[in-house]
Amino acid sequence: MAWTRDELEAAFENYQKTVVQATQTGDWNVFAEQFTEDATYLEHAFGSFAGREEIRRWVTRTMTAFPGNRMPEFPVSWYVIDEDRGWVICEVQNPMEDPGDGTEHGAANITILHYAGDNLWSHEEDAYNPMNFLSMAKKWCRHAEKSGNLPDDAKVWLEKMANVPG
């Protein structure tokens, strides 16, 4: 089905506003509610999820634990819209909060969304190199530790990842 550019722009704007709301409140259920009941989600480090409830379980678990819970925003750098097919493709920045020394740490991913109508999405894929995120999060932890700001959950995560190259 073809969608109008205006509808796709409005739906994508709503998607971005919902991500801001979830980040600010810590309630990632609102993010999951943007998907159809039978939506699919492909995440390059965590795997595939089928259905809104699987997406909800994954996103609430992931974004409320380190390193997701230390990412205060997810700004979109650019996007393109395929109005004939209902696709929105964008680059999303994933900056970490200040580790306490003013350094900046972050990585980007490409998000691919398929629109289903009524402000709902039937598919999302987050494409990125998980090793880039691992390396970035480890560097953030080292800076936070040197600054005396390493949170307990990040310390536990870093201990688990210490022998993983990256």
Image: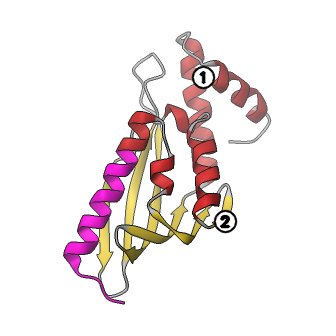
Q: Is residue 72 visible?
A: no
Instruction: Tell me which numbered mark, 1 or 2, is placed earlier along the sequence.
Output: 2
Label ID, residue 39: none
Q: Position of residue 123 (x, y in %)?
A: 51, 71
Q: In what quadrant of the picture does the C terminus appear?
A: top right
**Amino acid at circle 1:** Arg
The residue lying at 56 percent from left, 9 percent from top is 148
Q: Position of residue 87 (x, y in %)?
A: 38, 77
Q: Residues within 10 Å of mark 2 (few under 14, many from 20)?
A: some
Q: Is residue 147 visible?
A: yes
Q: Residue 78 lies in what quarter of the image? A: bottom left
Q: Which residue is mark 1?
A: 142
Q: Position of residue 126 (x, y in %)?
A: 52, 61
- The answer to whether 106 is drawn above or below residue 29 in the figure is above
Distance (Cα) linking label 1 and label 2:
31 Å
Viewer-closest of 95 and 82: 82
Front position among marks 1 and 2: 2
Is 160 displayed left or right of 117 in the figure? right
Q: Secondary structure at mark 2?
A: strand
Viewer-closest of 133 and 154: 154
Q: Is residue 14 magenta?
A: yes
Viewer-closest of 152 and 98: 152
The residue lying at 76 percent from left, 27 percent from top is 159
- The magenta segment is 1-20
Mark 1 vs 2: CB contact within 8 A:
no
- The answer to whether 49 is drawn above or below residue 84 in the figure is above
Viewer-closest of 165 and 91: 91
Q: Is residue 89 magenta?
A: no
The residue lying at 40 percent from left, 53 percent from top is 92
Is 157 displayed left or right of 74 in the figure? right
**Amino acid at circle 2:** Ser
Label ID, residue 48: 2
